[in-house]
Image: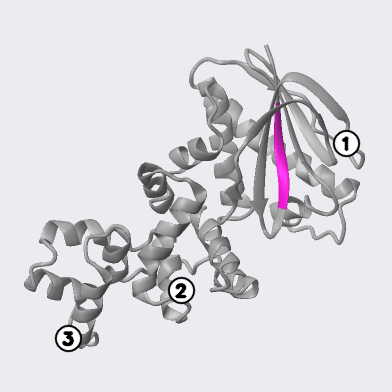
Amino acid sequence: MLNRLFGNYLVEKQLLKQEQLDDLLPVPKDLKAEVETIAVINKVISSATAQELLKQIDKSAERFGETAIDAGYLTDEKLDEILTYQSNAFMKFVQELLNANVLGMEQINPLLDEFQQNGEFSDAQLSSLIHDDLEQCVNIFVPLKANRLKEFVLTMIRTIRRLIDCDAYLDKAYTAHSLQLDKYACQTIAGDLHIRVYISAPGNGLLAIANYFTGDTYEAVNEDALDNVGEFINCINGLFATNLSYDDVSVDMNAPEYALDGPFISNEKLYVIPIHANGSSFRAVLEVYE
């Protein structure tokens, strides 16, 4: 999630072009972040110290971690901890920025500090974003009080990241009492829990889902594309219902619905969650019934 959020910030500051960001993401699965990169991001070693150590070693024959231990900057235990983050998505993204000479190591933490201040993230929230603690990341953007709704949103975001876009991200959610929807698909969950789940977007925004959920490709959002989005919602709800069953909570799911013209919905409890994936934006709307 942080890869796009931080990447967008770099684009806004004109340190990175949108096309460059799109080319850099998603980060390659086989890429590993360097020990010095992780140490600097985690503020274990300053960028100045890391750069000085790099000047002293022959990386083809010497390892940065061992050199940092010999110099007294790291312990064996701290190095072991750092190594566990080599596959962390954000660490890998920063490594790509360094490898592409988009940023210098001395820029990483000052830019992260600016990003934190600009986004009004606490230290704990930024740490959750950096270390991809998805449950806490969802809490940052969707601060729901009801545990079941939190579980649903977490299931939804996990499914979007797994099946649609691993770098999908959120904007701050909000509540509404009424809402005009655009093109949409939806499904009702009924039983011990009663929720109507919509995914809606204007124009061709829902192609972000329809063109990635299956092998189908659509030039524009039509009824077939919306049917695909409805099946994606069904997938999310099915996973959620399975998780509920482990707690003896029984629900059924109605058949998905969709239309090219969205309805005007009104309810005391509408939760609107803006989501960005595959270069497009859409809204998940939860209509909650008592």
Tell me the crowding category of disc 1: few under 14, some 14 to 19, or many 20 or more residues within 10 angstroms, Cα based.
Answer: some
Q: Is residue 82 left or right of residue 88?
A: left
Q: Mark 1 points at which residue?
A: 262
Q: Main secondary structure of the magenta part?
A: strand
Q: In what element is the residue under mark 3?
A: helix
Q: What stretch is highlighted in magenta?
A: 281-286
Q: Name the residue under label 3.
A: 56
Q: In what element is the residue under mark 2?
A: helix
Tell me the crowding category of disc 2: few under 14, some 14 to 19, or many 20 or more residues within 10 angstroms, Cα based.
Answer: many
Give whichever of 132, 251 is nearer the camera. 132
Give the mark nearest the N terminus, 1 or 3.
3
Q: In this view, does 150 lie to the left or right of 284?
A: left
Give above or below for 110 relative to 249: below
Q: In this view, does 197 lie to the left or right of 263?
A: left
Which residue corresponds to the image point at 27% horizontal and 71% vertical from the top-left?
47
Q: Name the residue under label 2.
A: 97
Quadrant placement of the C terminus: top right
